[in-house]
Amino acid sequence: MNTFNIKVLALAIFLASPLAAEEVASTIASDDLDMADSYAEEEQPAAAMQAVGYVPDGKRFTLVAKGPSPASELFKRLLDAEAANEIPRAMRIAQEAVAADGAFAPAHLALGRLQVKARAFTDAELTLTSYIEANPGNWESWYWLGTARMLQNNPKGAESALDQALNLNGEVPELWVHRSLLEQERGDYVTALQLLAIALELEPNHPQALLNVAYCNDALGNWALAQSTYRRFLASAHRGQVPAMTRFAVIKHLSGPSIDGSGSTLAESDLESK
């Protein structure tokens, strides 16, 4: 039987990595407003456009301010703090941004995401549910809500949220990886592998997907395949992209006895320290 703590290892990787959606908002928010007219002609995310002073006007956006709002300035600061993995400081800044402008969607979503990262799950559930009521079409908010519920051992709630995220955007590998975690915890490794195959179609060397494919084969007793996939994971997991403890745990697992009768040498306590 696989003795890896699947949830801890897989989530540790992703909680350390901000999503591309916030990079879009950050890029647009930091652009010179003199260039804003060119953005207005394109289909940019509403939240990101609002970050530089635009509001929806039919199918276009109308500039309503010549400079960034206090909330958008705070939003840029919180992204910098989050990128530096200063989660408590980023969360405080997010709370300031929401207090400065309760309608500023990027900060509201960032606060929910940071509360998940800080494991303040009750607060995260309230923040994200409130955000979703106003922005039901944002896949990232459903993803973080599903993550919060997963970490609170609420598999049905997590499944509902992650399925909604996938309905909104099936092109994000992390969504398929996290959806597979629920199947792994149910012991359905075959279905989990099918979901992970989709993630790898989207990104063939995706570290989380490779790691979980190895887990599944490990659990199914396919040690040779598991071993080769663990090694693919180590080759794809660059320094800074994956927590050092995760890499160490995999290396330790590979160096110990195989699970085909003798069991792994990896203890859950090794992983919980991350």
Image (cartoon, grey):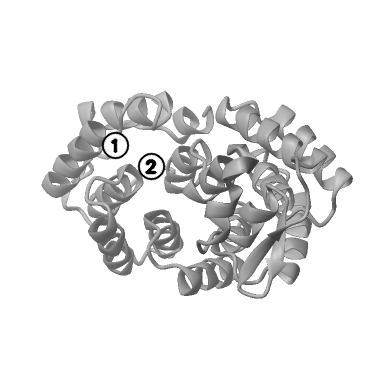
Q: Position of residue 270 (x, y in %)?
A: 45, 28
- Marks 2 and 1 close (CB-CB < 8 Å): yes
Q: Secondary structure at mark 1?
A: loop
Density class for disc 1 (Cα within 10 Å; few <14, some 14-19, many ≥20) is many
Q: Earlier in the sequence, mark 2 or mark 1?
A: 2
Q: Position of residue 82 (x, y in %)?
A: 61, 32
Q: Secondary structure at mark 2?
A: loop
- The answer to whether residue 242 is visible is yes
What's the distance in space between the residues labelled 2 and 1, CA to CA?
A: 8 Å
Q: Camera-side residue: 72 or 152? A: 72
Against 127, residue 163 (above or below) is: below
The residue depicted at 22 percent of the width and 51 percent of the height is: 204
Q: Position of residue 267 (x, y in %)?
A: 41, 32
Kindly identify which residue carries mark 2.
Answer: 4
Against 274, residue 104 (above or below) is: below
The residue depicted at 82 percent of the width and 47 percent of the height is: 98
Q: Camera-side residue: 216 or 221? A: 216
Q: Camera-side residue: 6 or 22? A: 22
